[in-house]
DNA sequence: AAACGGCACAACCGCCTTGGC
DNA sequence: AGCCAAGGCGGTTGTGCCGTT
């Protein structure tokens, strides 16, 4: 079907009230129409796109549909371990700056990352009975969750049965060891290092935030000493398929252990 | 087989920022 | 400098799917 013959209308300005705006899920036909219009007129000027396409959608709605779904670069599906790691790291640096975080995950949209955070990460906080923004939960992420993710990524990159995404990540990060990961991209890079103070991550392009524990000796997560109590207790049975590895980490037993740790005065 | 609940994701809403006039 | 429209962003809601009872 030629959308330009059937769908496009004249560029007569119309207010939203006049053109009874359509809402709700997009149809395949609407998608095709929007794609065709963007291919011709390009991204941006979304109100014009909405008008020119003949879609009874707002410019905002068109923009959202394009950015989150129709763009060729958009990647959907399981969030890989590497992506999980990046999300955790970047969120602890920037907070709910979803679009900024999304810039570092090619093909992922801010909406997707936001949804991931809400459904997976906040669920874990709920199970731990602490606020997702609380110091306790952030510390748990920094000193338990993230180091374990790093270990798993390294382990899987060394495994011959590593998933394609894992292998690709290993390629991107170059010489991968348990102690250092460097993730580079066009807009900056992420360095992950594990030392006597536990895992630390810093963005080369933004050094404003460092994860130095207030009193490191209280965090039983030293890979140097091997007394990785938290890791041992929280590791559980990881799966490395990029799926719900967190669920396996945060099983009931582990959550109980972590709760105990969070209640420890020394920890705070 | 039906009802229910939880989850994941798409889409909307409202506020803020930016740029043009 | 002030106004307005458009775009961007984060929060929230709606909906369909799937597993469990």
Image (cartoon, coloured by chain):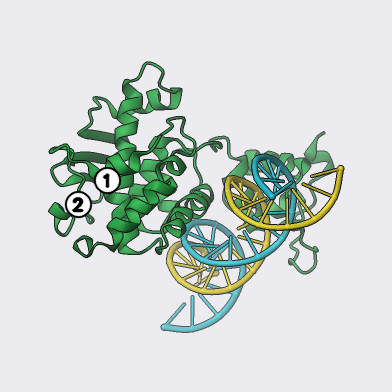
Chain colours: A green, B yellow, C cyan
State the residue lying farthest toward the top.
A160
Residue drawn at the location 41% of the way across and 58% of the way down: A128
Q: Position of residue A127 (x, y in %)?
A: 45, 56
Residue under mark 1: which chain is it in? A
Disc with the residue nearer the chain's start (1 vs 2): 2
- Left or right: where does residue A197 sit relative to residue A72? left
Quarter placement of the C terminus of chain A:
bottom left
Q: Are marks 1 and 2 in contact (CB under 8 Å)?
A: yes
For label 1, the residue is A230
- Horizontal side of A72 relative to A245 (left or right) equals right
Where residue B21 sits, quadrant-wise, is bottom right
Left or right: A42 in relation to C2: right
Q: Chain of mark 2?
A: A
User: Is A164 drawn above or below residue A81 in the view shown?
Assistant: above
Residue A145 sits above or below residue B12 on the image: above
Residue closest to the eye, A81 or A125: A125
Element assignment for label 1: helix
Distance from disc 1 to disc 2, alpha carbons, whole Å, reads: 8 Å
How many residues crowd mark 2 within 10 Å: few (<14), some (14–19), many (20+)? many
- The reply to whether residue A93 is in sight is no
Closer-to-camera residue (A3/C21): C21
Residue where numbered disc 2 is placed: A219
Dot 1 alpha-carbon crowd within 10 angstroms: few under 14, some 14 to 19, many 20 or more: many
For the point 18% across and 38% down, the residue is A223
Horizontal side, residue A82 vs residue C14: left or right:
left
Name the residue located 52 percent from the left edge and 36 percent from the top edge: A78
Q: How many marks?
A: 2
Q: Nearer the viewer, residue A208 or A121?
A: A121
Residue at x-position 43% and y-position 48%:
A252
Quadrant of residue A56 within the rendered picture = bottom right
Expressed as whole percent of the image width and height from the top left, the position of residue C17 reads 71, 41
Q: Are marks 1 and 2 on the same chain?
A: yes
């Amino acid at each position: 079907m030629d959308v330009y013959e059937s769908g496009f209308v004249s560029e007569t300005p119309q207010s939203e009230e006049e053109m009874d705006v359509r809402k709700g899920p997009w149809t395949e036909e609407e998608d095709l129409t929007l794609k065709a219009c963007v291919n011709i007129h390009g991204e941006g000027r979304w109100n014009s796109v909405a008008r020119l396409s003949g879609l009874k959608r707002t410019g905002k709605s068109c923009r959202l549909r394009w950015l989150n779904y129709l763009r060729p670069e958009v990647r959907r599906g399981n969030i890989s371990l590497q992506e999980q790691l990046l999300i955790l790291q970047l969120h602890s640096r920037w907070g709910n700056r979803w679009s900024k975080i999304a810039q570092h995950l090619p093909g992922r949209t801010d909406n997707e990352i936001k949804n991931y955070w809400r459904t997976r990460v906040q669920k874990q906080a709920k199970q731990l009975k602490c606020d997702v923004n609380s110091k306790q939960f952030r510390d748990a992420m920094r000193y338990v969750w993230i180091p374990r993710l790093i270990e798993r990524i390294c382990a899987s990159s060394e495994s011959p049965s590593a998933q394609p995404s894992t292998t690709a990540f290993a390629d991107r990060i170059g010489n991968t060891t348990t102690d250092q990961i460097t993730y580079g991209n066009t807009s900056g890079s992420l360095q992950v290092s594990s030392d006597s103070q536990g895992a630390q991550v810093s963005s080369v392009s933004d050094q404003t935030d460092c994860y130095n524990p207030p009193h490191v000796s209280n965090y039983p997560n030293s890979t140097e000493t091997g007394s990785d109590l938290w890791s041992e207790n929280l590791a559980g049975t990881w799966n490395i398929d990029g799926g719900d590895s967190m669920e396996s980490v945060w099983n009931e037993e582990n959550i109980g252990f972590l709760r105990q740790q969070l209640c420890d005065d020394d920890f705070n």
